Amino acid sequence: MTNPTVSPHHPEPADGAGEFNRNVIAEFRAREGAVGGDLAGAPLLLLTVVGARSGEPRTTPLVYLPDGDRLVVFASNGGSDTDPVWYRNLVARSEVTVEVGTDRYPALAAPVDPAEHDALWARQIAAQPQFAGYRTAARTVPLVALVRA
């Protein structure tokens, strides 16, 4: 069911993250990509995917790693043993919308080549050491490359 108070330009957060993500998204947009709190100073983007079952747009704030002409995001789900909903949705449909700062654009999402995975993961841990705790023995964290369409 669609929330009638949410404009199509500002869809509901994904993953049932609720109020926390809504607050981050609102702050991100109000402050042109800057946020405070635990995410202050982190490279942050908003990723909008289309729900595989609902067909509704869902937006999630994600930390990213710049890599040439693409941005890499991490389906760590905070170290959970399961993939986040946004990842399952973009596997079903690779057309997404990315917001970085005030720039909003369509992009294509694709899993990172396994040959690149460990090097990119190591770069992310070097940039943000807390990511080391997000990898579990139960699964390898999927990495997704976002490329402007």
Image (cartoon, rainbow, N blue to C red):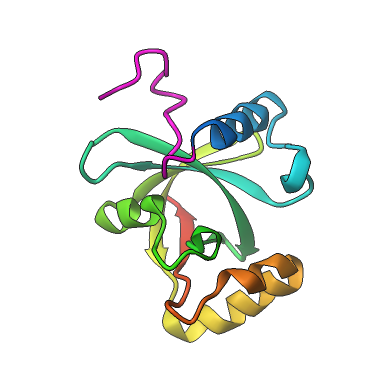
**Predominant SS of the magenta segment:** loop
The picture quadrant where one finds residue 94 is: bottom left
Residue name at image x 69 percent, y 51 percent: 43
> Which residues lie in the magenta part?
1-17
Residue name at image x 57 percent, y 61 percent: 69
Residue 57 image offset from top left, x and y in percent: 35, 34
Figure check: 99 above or below 23: below
Figure check: 89 above or below 141: above
Quick check: 138 left or right of 53? right
Figure check: 4 above or below 71: above
Q: How many marks?
A: 0
Residue 140 image offset from top left, x and y in percent: 45, 77
Residue 82 image offset from top left, x and y in percent: 39, 64
Residue 86 image offset from top left, x and y in percent: 39, 50
- Can residue 72 be found in the magenta stretch? no
Res 94 seen here: no
- Can residue 6 be found in the magenta stretch? yes
Res 28 seen here: yes
Quick check: 91 left or right of 29? left
